[in-house]
Image (cartoon, rainbow, N blue to C red):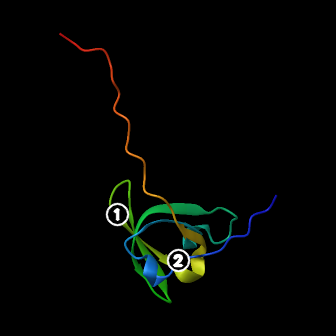
Amino acid sequence: MRYQLEVRLTPADIGKRVVIRWRPAALEDSKLMTDVLGILEQADDRSFTVRRTRDGQLVVVPRERALAGKVVPSARPRRRHEGPESS
């Protein structure tokens, strides 16, 4: 089964959690892609700016390099490991 890649992000999605699949310039001559997951801070006709969830870094994705993008649900709260109590 093949999936059609589509960028479904607009300025109305600013402030929401998103994922964008894109091909950075360094990977231009390959079939490799990368994803960025985080909060959409900016979206216009030239680029998307996403603040990565993992480390807070801003990533600017040129619109012409974006292959797919969509709003995703909020992350589930992490479970806390309940280990044996130490005395």
Identify the residue at horizontal 32%, vertical 60% (top origin).
56
Res. 38 image quadrant:
bottom left
Q: Is residue 57 above or below residue 86?
A: below
Query: Element at badge 2?
Result: loop
- Name the residue furthest bottom: 45
Of 22 and 31, which appears nearest the observer? Answer: 22
- Name the residue furthest left: 87
Horizontally, residue 25 falls left or right of residue 31, namely left
The residue pinned by badge 2 equals 9
Q: Position of residue 57 (x, y in %)?
A: 34, 63
Horizontally, residue 27 falls left or right of residue 60, namely right
Q: Residues within 10 Å of mark 2 (few under 14, many from 20)?
A: some
Q: Position of residue 84 (x, y in %)?
A: 30, 14
- Name the residue furthest top: 87
User: In the image, what residue type sits under mark 1?
Assistant: Gln
Identify the residue at horizontal 50%, vertical 82% (top origin).
10
Res. 83 image quadrant:
top left
Q: Earlier in the sequence, mark 2 or mark 1?
A: 2
User: In the image, what residue type sits under mark 2?
Assistant: Leu
Identify the residue at horizontal 43%, vertical 57% (top origin).
74
Horizontally, residue 22 falls left or right of residue 78, namely right
Query: Element at badge 1?
Result: loop
Of 37 and 72, which appears nearest the observer? Answer: 72
Identify the residue at horizontal 43%, vertical 52% (top origin).
75
The residue pinned by badge 1 equals 57
